[in-house]
Amino acid sequence: MNGVTQLVLIIAVIGYVLVRRMLGQPAEAKRMLVLPAILVVIGLWNIESVTGSSIALIFLVVTTVIGIGLGALRGLSIRLYHQDDIVFMRYTWVTVLLWVLNIGVKVGAGALLATLDKSTDSNSAMFVSLGLGLLAEGVVVLAKALRSGQQIVWKTGKDGAPHERSQFLDDLQRRVNGRR
């Protein structure tokens, strides 16, 4: 996958997440965990261009740690509410500002890396960092949702179908809230 294609895909993923979550949506565990995992796998699949350079590897580690931290902060900034007896989530303006900061860090680090090491494709590392940041966000949101006492869905039902639940999440929520 070339650099332009990767960059367009990254922008599309961020745009999709921002629009959907600004409007509010169910706190769907599958969406918060599986999409980030897919991004990490895509990033790891194309990471050979980063691992050949010690400078690029350092940039990957630093931007990934920053991305995870900003993802966790985004998770804390997300507003949870309940509707139809399930947990919903909505991005706040603080969440959007944290996304802007995250993108700024990644673009700035990519530009700096490009000047220091012209042989490295920094976009490959962005998938790993973006995926782990989204995963951190999802884990924080799910932790908050577990304490809410409202139903967390694994996957929302389509066309009137019931929502899919997760026995694991239901059991975890009961334990977190001290219910058997």
Image (spheres, rainbow, N blue to C red):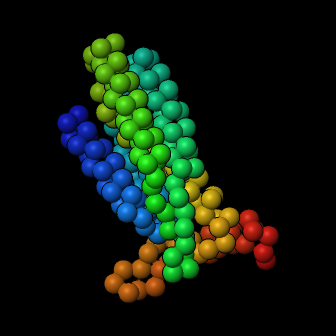
Residue at 42% across / 36% down in the picture? 102
Pinpoint residue 111: horizontal percent, then vertical percent.
31, 22
Pinpoint residue 56: horizontal percent, then vertical percent.
40, 21
Q: Is residue 105 above or below residue 17?
A: above
**Quadrant of the image containing the C terminus:** bottom right
Foreground pick, 51 / 12? 12
On the question of residue 26 being in view, the answer is yes
Residue at 41% across / 46% down in the picture? 96
On the question of residue 47 being in view, the answer is no
Residue 45 falls in image quadrant: top left
Residue at 65% across / 67% down in the picture? 148
Residue 105 falls in image quadrant: top left
Residue at the extreme front: 93
Q: Is residue 95 above or below residue 141?
A: above
Residue 136 horizontal side relative to residue 9, left or right: right
Residue 112 horizontal side relative to residue 6, left or right: right
**Quadrant of the image containing the N terminus:** top left
Residue at 38% across / 87% down in the picture? 160
Pinpoint residue 130: horizontal percent, then vertical percent.
41, 42
Pinpoint residue 49: horizontal percent, then vertical percent.
33, 27
Q: Is residue 79 above or below residue 131?
A: below
Residue 107 horizontal side relative to residue 74, left or right: left
Q: How many marks?
A: 0
